[in-house]
Image: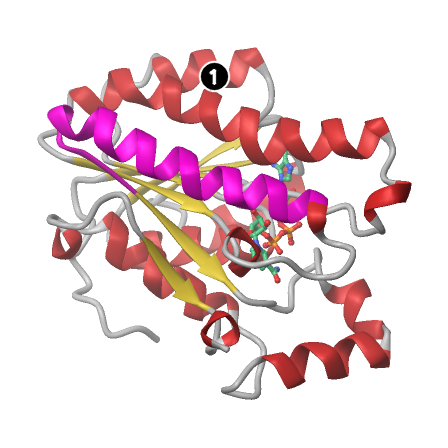
Amino acid sequence: MNGFNKELFIGKTILIAGAGKGIGLACAKMAAELGGNVIAVARTQSDLDALASQYPDRIESWAMDVTSEVFFERVKALPVLHGLVNNAGINRVGPMEDQSNENIDAVIDLNVRTLYKISQSAITPMKNADSASIVNMSSQMGFVGSPNRTLYCMSKHAVEGITKAMAVELAEFNIRVNTVAPTFVLTPMTKPMFEDETFKKFVFDMIPLGRLGKVEDIAHSCTFLLSEMASMITGTSIKVDGGWTAR
Ligand code: NAD
């Protein structure tokens, strides 16, 4: 259930990078429910098959690694693209002094370099749309620090910075660029974290609204930013954080 007009995305092609699970899956479902032609990208074919079986006319499945050159080329070759959600991201939690080069490179490669490369590839097909919108999946950790999360925070602060720069540079093509910055949401990425009761208490104590985000909370903000309802909004962020960063 959502309160959007059911025809919001009719005639619009929207690509979700990292659509197999969690937040990206919720964004893909919402865009399909609202009539969009959704290109869902994930590595796991079975995840994509499950999504496509729910919306057979609306989902085009690309079983690909979003970090690959072949994927970037395929995006660039699209005839037109109206919306992009750069959702694929990872976290490697741990004390700063223990982070390996492998962890540093993995987080920067997916959360920053890949987001840049997908967006770069999307410019050509987005220029063929009257207007277009990129939503970069950031985090509340793009605004604050938190124990054991300096590496992740670095990457999400970069996402906030890139977003502003892209918004300025791409405005002449009527391509808007914004972020959605969630607090903790229960997804396959965070499930193991909440098995630690001390950590769970820390998180709930930090969120004034007293609950975790739901994937639909995040998808609602993505949908709004992708749509023409946000046609004057670029270079900013919607924090879906229950008040975490307001403290
Ligand atoms: P998730 O791990 O549950 O899902 C991510 C999806 O992206 C999966 O379908 C995964 O297969 C896909 N993916 C990852 N790497 C990929 C690759 N190389 N190629 C293709 N697909 C790939 O993650 P999530 O919790 O839904 O997080 C999604 C985004 O939201 C991330 O950018 C994350 O940093 C951000 N975020 C999550 C939370 C949270 O609490 N879950 C909070 C703030 C921000």
Picture layout, residue 116 above or below residue 244: above
Q: Is residue 28 left or right of residue 178?
A: right
Whether residue 14 can be seen here: yes
Residue 43, by quadrant, is top right
Q: Is residue 162 left or right of residue 2?
A: right
What element does badge 1 sit on? helix
Q: Is residue 217 magenta?
A: no
Look at 19% across and 63% down and name the residue there.
Answer: 6
Q: Is residue 197 left or right of residue 49?
A: right
Look at 62% across and 48% down and name the residue there.
Answer: 153
What's the amino acid at mark 1? Answer: Phe
The colour scheme used here is secondary structure
* SS assignment for the magenta stretch, majority: helix
Q: Position of residue 226 (x, y in %)?
A: 26, 48
Q: Position of residue 201 (x, y in %)?
A: 75, 84
Question: Quadrant where the N terminus lies?
Answer: bottom left
Ligand 1 within 8 Å of the CB at mark 1: no
Look at 26% across and 29% down and name the residue there.
Answer: 81
Q: Nearer the viewer, residue 91 or 36?
A: 91
Picture layout, residue 4 above or below residue 40: below
Q: Position of residue 68 (x, y in %)?
A: 60, 17
Look at 17% across and 47% down and name the residue there.
Answer: 10
Q: Which residue is mark 1?
A: 72
Mark 1 is surrounded, within 10 Å at the Cα level, by few (under 14), some (14 to 19) or many (20 or more) other residues, namely some
Residue at the limit of the structure toward the right, as seen here: 98
Q: Is residue 125 left or right of residue 191?
A: left
Point out the stretch of residues depicted in magenta. 151-177
